[in-house]
Image: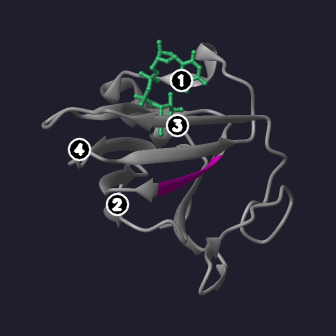
Amino acid sequence: MKGASLVNLDIHGDKSGSLIALEALSKQVPFEIKRVYYIFGVSDNIVRGKHAHYNLKQLLICVNGSVDISVEDGKNKEVFHLDRANQGLYIEGFIWREMKNFSKDTVLVVLASEHYNEADYIRDYSQFLNEVKDK
Ligand code: T46
């Protein structure tokens, strides 16, 4: 889907373990990183997200455990199952997202292109569907 795609992250590894390096303005992270946050300790049956952003680029990486991320552009819906540290989900544009089916040990790291700004969120699904028609 335009606006949400999987990104493979290169592993530098040998018998001593693995390392993944992420750099701003690279192929994997095509934006300046202004914020990093991570989500963990989510109980069963919790659904997070349920919003879209007006202006935000993000790379979501499930560095431990697993989670399903559903994304929707107003017409199409797709679900991405994230369960490895060397794969990210890049989301940009006006995309409704929901995160569900967190395993107990999930740690979801998110790199974001902007500082936190509640005014950038659209949290009402019907409003999202109305606004997406005009885009
Ligand atoms: C997104 C998905 C993937 C802050 O104070 N600063 C921050 O940078 C963030 C992200 C959140 N917060 C506060 C705001 C709320 O009081 O943390 C609380 C939980 O945030 P929220 O309910 O928005 O969390 P999620 O998991 O539903 O959504 C988050 C991001 O907000 C969102 O941008 O795309 O993760």
**Between residues 62 and 73, which one lies in front from this camera angle?**
62
Q: Secondary structure at mark 1?
A: strand
Classify mark 3: residues with Cα within 10 Å, few (<14), some (14-19) or many (20+): some
83 to the left or right of 43: right
Q: Amino acid at mark 4?
A: Lys
**Residue 76: mark:** 2
Q: Earlier in the sequence, mark 3 or mark 1?
A: 3
Residue that carries the numbered disc 3 in the rendered image: 38
Q: Quadrant of residue 14?
A: bottom right
Q: Quadrant of the C terminus?
A: top right
Q: Secondary structure at mark 3?
A: strand
Q: Amino acid at mark 1?
A: Tyr
**Between residues 1 and 80, which one lies in front from this camera angle?**
80
Q: Residue furthest left?
A: 45
Residue that carries the numbered disc 4 in the rendered image: 104
Span of residues in magenta: 58-62
64 to the left or right of 33: left
* Residue under the image location 36 percent in, 65 percent down: 83
Q: Kindly indicate whether the residue at mark 4 contacts the one at mark 1 (C-beta within 8 angstroms).
A: no
Nearer the camera: disc 2 or disc 3: 3
Estimate the x, y position of residue 111 in percent, counting from the top left: 66, 45
Q: Amino acid at mark 3?
A: Tyr
Estimate the x, y position of residue 20 in percent, counting from the top left: 67, 68
Q: Earlier in the sequence, mark 2 or mark 1?
A: 2
Q: Secondary structure at mark 2?
A: loop
**How far apart are labels 2 and 3 at the CA level?**
27 Å
Ligand 1 within 8 Å, label 1 CB: yes
Q: Kindly indicate whether the residue at mark 1 contacts the one at mark 3 (C-beta within 8 angstroms).
A: no
Q: Secondary structure at mark 4?
A: loop
Q: Earlier in the sequence, mark 1 or mark 4?
A: 4
Residue that carries the numbered disc 1 in the rendered image: 121
